[in-house]
Image (spheres, rainbow, N blue to C red):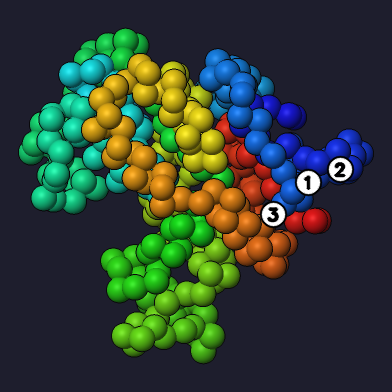
């Protein structure tokens, strides 16, 4: 399935090779290009097609308020943003906060919901069912995604490289599972290696190791049931933001917030790191990760392959 925003294979990867692969996540070498110049309408159309093909639009409980807990509301501009950790969420929260309230230099952590609420930024969960439905029907809705494996690397680096809450929270589990193979950090705490982190994601992602920083996009934002108007992809973010800025957040000051984030990101280097790390892993673990994040790969046209 060649689609908008997907990584396209070099011509020597044959159709027969692709057919042998797990579901529709076909073989990918590193030498790929991005198809940038395709319309957002096509990207949204393909997402809707995948939702219908696999029946992922069924069973949604629109009255379950947990389905709306990550969607930020900008009443001033009539915009809804579904925030996903480790996908530029701090930058875009700052971005939306400025547009909605005029607050620019925050003196608090934008990832704390109660602090955002105190300065006038609400979540969709804060509204009654009637107001939620009106906003879901009439507001502009957007989401930002990145390659699922790239996000896992970012989550590990951010949450287990220093004395974070995640590191403290999962020390006992890490020590219990890996015992003498567990590693102490410079502070004496137990931290998992990257391979061990992925093992924990595979084995306990629905129970003891469930965490919003590696929860799937599908679970975060319900893209098969909430009809988003715009999908920004990390890999094509500069291209995607041009029409986005033309319709929303028009001032240069607001746009600079995001450009600063883009300036820190080298997409080419990030994807090389994804290829390097995941190609070296036990491929049974990779196959299980592909299954866990299968909806994310298919809905947002990402792919992976290890036979380079």
Q: In the structure shown, which secondary structural element does the residue marked by tag 2 occupy?
A: loop
CA gap, disc 2 and disc 3: 20 Å
For the residues labelled 1 and 2, say whether their Cβ atoms are less than 8 Å apart: yes
Residue that extends furthest to the front in the rendered view of this protein:
252
Image quarter (top left, top right, bottom left or bottom right) of the C terminus: bottom right
How many numbered discs? 3
Q: In the structure shown, which secondary structural element does the residue marked by tag 1 occupy?
A: loop
Which residue is disc 3 drawn over?
Answer: 287
CA gap, disc 3 and disc 1: 13 Å
Q: Give the residue displayed 42% in from the left and 77% down from the top.
A: 191
CA gap, disc 1 and disc 2: 8 Å
Residue 73 placement (x, y as % from top left) = 24, 26
Residue 86 at least partly seen: yes
Residue 173's quadrant in the figure? Answer: bottom left
Residue 170 placement (x, y as % from top left) = 37, 70
Q: In the structure shown, which secondary structural element does the residue marked by tag 3 occupy?
A: helix
Q: Nearer the viewer, mark 1 or mark 2?
A: 2
Which residue is disc 2 drawn over?
Answer: 13
Horizontally, is 238 left or right of 48 in the view?
A: left
Which residue is disc 1 drawn over?
Answer: 27
Q: Is residue 158 above or below residue 36?
A: below
For the residues labelled 2 and 3, say whether their Cβ atoms are less than 8 Å apart: no
Q: Residues within 10 Å of mark 3 (few under 14, many from 20)?
A: some
Earlier sequence position, callout 2 versus callout 3: 2
For the residues labelled 3 and 1, say whether their Cβ atoms are less than 8 Å apart: no
Q: Give the residue displayed 36% in from the left and 86% down from the top.
A: 186
Residue 22 at least partly seen: no
Residue 236 placement (x, y as % from top left) = 54, 36
Q: Give the residue displayed 30% in from the left and 73% down from the top.
A: 163
């Amino acid at each position: 399935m060649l689609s908008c925003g997907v990584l396209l294979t070099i011509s020597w990867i044959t159709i027969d090779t692709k057919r042998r692969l797990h579901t529709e996540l076909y073989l990918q070498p590193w030498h790929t290009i991005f198809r940038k110049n395709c319309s957002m309408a096509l990207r949204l159309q393909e997402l809707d097609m995948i939702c219908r093909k696999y029946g992922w639009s069924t069973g949604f409980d629109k009255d379950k308020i947990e389905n709306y807990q990550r969607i930020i509301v900008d009443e001033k501009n009539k915009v809804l943003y579904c925030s996903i950790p480790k996908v530029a969420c701090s930058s875009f929260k700052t971005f939306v906060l400025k547009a909605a309230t005029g607050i620019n230099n925050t003196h608090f952590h934008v990832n704390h919901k109660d602090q955002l609420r105190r300065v006038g930024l609400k979540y969709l969960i804060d509204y009654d069912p009637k107001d939620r439905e009106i906003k879901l029907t009439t507001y502009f809705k957007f989401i930002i995604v990145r390659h699922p494996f790239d996000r896992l690397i970012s989550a590990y680096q951010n949450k287990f490289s220093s004395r974070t809450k995640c590191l403290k929270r999962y020390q006992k589990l890490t020590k219990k599972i890996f015992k003498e193979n567990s590693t102490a950090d410079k502070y004496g705490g137990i931290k998992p290696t990257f391979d061990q982190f992925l093992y924990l994601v595979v084995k306990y992602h629905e129970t003891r190791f469930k965490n919003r920083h590696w929860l799937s996009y599908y679970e975060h934002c319900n893209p098969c049931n909430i009809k988003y108007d715009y999908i920004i992809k990390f890999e094509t973010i500069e291209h995607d933001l041009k029409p986005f800025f033309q319709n929303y957040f028009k001032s240069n000051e607001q746009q600079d917030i995001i450009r600063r984030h883009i300036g820190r990101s080298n997409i080419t280097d990030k994807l090389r790191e994804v290829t390097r790390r995941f190609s070296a892993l036990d491929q049974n673990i990779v196959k299980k990760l592909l299954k866990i994040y299968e909806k994310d790969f298919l809905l947002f046209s990402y792919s992976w392959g290890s036979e380079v």
